[in-house]
Image: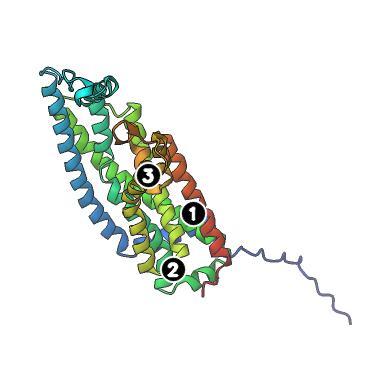
């Protein structure tokens, strides 16, 4: 007797899930790695302290400049050597006009308010960017320091996803730090200007631009830190290199371009190229007006600093991704 056995419909093959999870899960994992270490809150405490100190200094400077301008308007302007003939050591007519322009600018209340508001509302940028480049480097080097890099890349074989998730986490953390610092700056700064009977609307474009460009600076320096961490696996080496790279870039750039201007290319336009140094670019991009490096010699506009810093960030992200894809991580 033949037995006929009925078979149900053939089961569809199971769908294979890509290894490593979705991009959002990878970013959440990177964020969790940071929040479960002591680094973020240590940086947070130090940033609050340095921001408070910078805020106090900028408010005192603003108060001194505004007080000087108010008193100067009640006094007759200086003669700037007009009574001394140029042939007897007196300044030329062009030099006198330049000194008069600078004097009028130094007692212009509106200009001082814009410059002071931009400085106050971006207080803490100097040390904030330093912490961002260090934190960005730690996001990568922590993996090698704690010997979890192999596990991370085995769990997520697509190395591009890993480095992109680290870059995204660095951007999010930098934006969060910027938001906290900016809220403190705006609250204290607005209270000071209001108490001093000065009106400084945040909607004034030079002031608002400085605040927004400060956010961009925080983000880009965190990305640069990630790129540095990829290049230098050593946690100590990456943090020291990043700190030196940031801290020394401005004074070294100023010294270098001063020597070039003095001995090689004796033209004022040399100062326009100082923006190629990232530490200088981040300062230029948040300034409400062009930086003056010496008498009648100015640096480039704010947008040049923004373009240069964004370019460094893009290069750091691409190079970091390519190196991670090619390098042995064991």
**At 21% across and 35% down in the image, what residue appears?**
189
Q: Secondary structure at mark 3?
A: helix
Residue under label 2:
233
State the residue in front, 133 or 191: 133
**At 43% across and 35% down in the image, what residue appears?**
303
Disc 3 versus disc 2: nearer the observer: 3
From this view, report whether residue 82 is shown above or below residue 67.
Answer: above
322 vs 101, left or right, is right
- The location of residue 298, given as percent across then percent down, is 35, 34
**At 45% across and 72% down in the image, what residue appears?**
148
Residue 98 lies in quadrant: top left
From this view, report whether residue 272 is shown above or below residue 67.
Answer: below
Residue 215 lies in quadrant: top left
132 vs 6, left or right, is left
Residue under label 1:
316
Disc 1 versus disc 3: nearer the observer: 3
The answer to whether one can see residue 227 in this image is: yes
Residue at the far right: name it.
Answer: 1
- The location of residue 213, given as percent across then percent down, is 38, 39
Q: CA distance from mark 1 to mark 2?
A: 15 Å
Residue at the far front: name it.
Answer: 87
**At 81% across and 74% down in the image, what residue appears?**
5
Q: Earlier in the sequence, mark 3 or mark 2?
A: 2
């Amino acid at each position: 007797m033949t037995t006929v056995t009925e078979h149900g419909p053939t089961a569809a093959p199971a769908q294979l899930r890509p290894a490593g999870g979705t991009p959002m899960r990878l970013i959440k994992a990177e964020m969790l790695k940071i929040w479960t270490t002591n680094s973020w809150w240590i940086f947070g405490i130090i940033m609050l302290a340095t921001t408070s100190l910078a805020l106090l200094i900028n408010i005192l400077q603003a108060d001194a400049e505004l007080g000087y301008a108010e008193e100067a308007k009640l006094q007759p302007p200086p003669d700037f050597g007009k009574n001394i003939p140029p042939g007897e050591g007196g300044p030329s007519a062009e030099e006198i006009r330049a000194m008069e322009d600078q004097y009028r600018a130094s007692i212009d209340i509106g200009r001082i308010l814009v410059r002071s508001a931009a400085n106050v509302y971006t207080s803490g940028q100097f040390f904030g960017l330093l912490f961002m480049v260090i934190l960005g480097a730690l996001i990568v080097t922590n993996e090698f320091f704690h010997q979890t890099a192999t596990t991370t890349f085995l769990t997520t074989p697509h190395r591009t996803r890993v480095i992109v998730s680290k870059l995204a986490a660095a951007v999010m953390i930098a934006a969060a730090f910027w938001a906290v610092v900016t809220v403190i700056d705006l609250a204290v700064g607005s209270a000071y200007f209001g108490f001093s009977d000065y009106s400084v609307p945040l909607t004034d474009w030079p002031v608002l631009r400085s605040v927004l460009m400060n956010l961009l600076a925080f983000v880009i320096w965190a990305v640069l830190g990630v790129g540095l961490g990829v290049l230098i696996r050593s946690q100590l080496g990456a943090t020291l290199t990043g700190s030196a790279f940031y801290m020394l870039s401005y004074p070294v750039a100023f010294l270098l371009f001063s020597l070039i201007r003095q001995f090689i290319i004796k033209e004022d336009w040399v100062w326009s190229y100082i923006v190629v140094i990232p530490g200088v670019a981040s300062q230029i991009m948040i300034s409400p007006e062009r930086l003056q490096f010496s008498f009648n010699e100015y640096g480039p506009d704010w947008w040049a600093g923004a373009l240069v810093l964004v370019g460094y960030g893009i290069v750091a992200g691409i190079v970091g991704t390519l190196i991670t894809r090619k390098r042995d991580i064991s």
